[in-house]
Structure formats: C-alpha cells, structure tokens
Amino acid sequence: MTKRSAAWLLLLASAVLEAVWATALGQSEGFTQLLPTMVFAVTATLSMTGLGLAIRSIPLGTAYAVWVGIGAALTVGWAMAAGVEPFSLLKVLFIAGIVGCAAGLKSLPAVATSPPDRSDRSDRSDTKVPA
Amino acid sequence: MSWLILILSGSMEAVWAASLHRTFQASGRRRVPPALLFLVSVLASMGGLAIAMQSIPTGTAYAVWVGVGVVLTSTYAILTRAERPTTARLLLLTGIAACVVGLKVVA
C-alpha cells in the first residue's frame, strides 16, 4: 500500500470517528451523561489525531472538507437508518454528492506541498530559445 | 449577535485546521505553540457553535459553520501554497461544502 493510500484510509477512519463523537456529543446532554461524554472525549481525540496525521500527505483544504463531509454524511445517514430522522430522498442525494466529490478529490493527481522549483523548468526548450 | 458568534466560530475551524497542520509538520518543542493554538481554537469553535445554536436553528447553524470552515480552510491552504487551486479541485471542494449545507438545511 502506498503512503498516500494509507493516509486516505486514515482520513476515512477519522471521519467515521467524527460521526461517532458528534452522535455521542448529542447524547451527552451537555456532558451530564457519563458514558456518552467518555465516548465523545476518546473518539474526538482519536479523530483529530488521525486528521493531523493524514494532512502530512493529503492537502489541507481537501483533507478538512472530506473529513467534515464524510462525517456529516455518516451522522445523518446513521440517524436516518436508526429511524431518529425521517427518510428523505434529498438527504440521500446530498450524501451521494459528498461521497462522489470526496472520491473525485482522491482521484486528483498528488500535489507537491511546496511550489514548483524554478530549476525544474530550466531544461524546457521554450524557456531559453536563442533569438 | 448570535450570527456574529456563529461566523467567528466557523472561522475558528480554519484556525484549528491550520494549527493542526503546523503541529504535525513541526517537531520537538516547536510543536508546542501550534498545539496550544489548536486546543484554544477547537474549543472556541465548538463552544461558539453551541452558544449560537441556542438562538439559531441547529441545522442552519451547523450548515453556516461548516460552510465558513471549508471555505476559509481551503483559502488558507491555497494562499500558503499547501494546495494548488485547480478548477477540478475547487469545483469538488465547493460540491462537498454545498452538499453538507444542503444536508443540514433540509434536516
């Protein structure tokens, strides 16, 4: 497995944990319920550590959007599957849109974290054409 | 006032994402300042959202908060050259932000 694929798996796992802590936060009723509060503290820490590790090889804006998007899609999908929220075709379409955009971002070519070096271009024939 | 708090806490999302990025890029003692900034901004972001949600409907509040966070985080990443703003990338980032906003507004 390449380093970049591993980073994407880590990012997805962190997004799943984000859905877990968001749900636990809702059930903790202002941190008064012990078990959901503990689940929240552990999963929120793991989720953000995972995001931090993933952004060493995935661009920051992309990683943040995927993390938030997949987390929100799972939170709503889970609530619908559990019957907490009513089913709606629109919600399913939005969830599909998030997953589609995230997959599209993953398919984009890897981007260097620093701007391209000028020296990379010195061998291009069009840069130094004799008059 | 709640709207101001909401937009400020959305901006804190970008601050914590940026400082998390710095924390994991640095090593040793140089990790401490961005890590502290991360802790402060992540708490401010969630605390602000919780306060705003007392007077703005939950779905709307969350949608605005996420929207501001995604736009500012991407802007920061592009300005600092951490991310190249190709058309495809900008469209897909906008797509995710729009779908999350839609998801929370219909809820």
Image (cartoon, coloured by chain):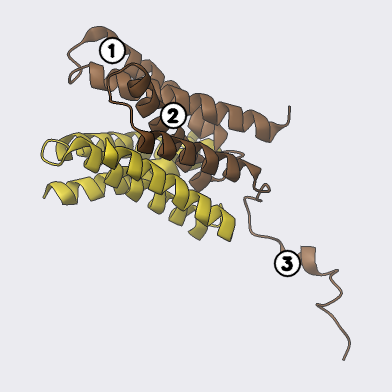
Badge 1 marks a residue whose secondary structure is: helix
Q: CA distance from mark 2 to mark 1?
A: 18 Å
Residue pointed to by mark 3 = A118
Specify whether disc 3 shares its chain with disc 2: yes
In the image, residue B73 above or below residue A52 = below
Q: Chain of mark 3?
A: A
* Callout 3 touching callout 1 (CB < 8 Å): no
Q: Colour of chain A?
A: brown
The residue most toward the front is A89
Is A91 positioned to the left or the right of A64 in the image?
left
* Viewer-closest of A62 and B63: B63
Instruction: Please report the residue visible at 28 percent of the width from the left and 33 percent of the height from the top.
Output: B43
* Residue B26 seen: no
Is B57 positioned to the left or the right of A20 in the image?
left
Quadrant occupied by the C terminus of chain A: bottom right
Q: In the picture, one chain is yellow; tell me its letter.
A: B
Residue A51: image location, x then y, percent: 49, 32
Residue type marked 3: Arg
Residue B2: image location, x then y, percent: 13, 46
In the image, residue A117 above or below residue A44 = below
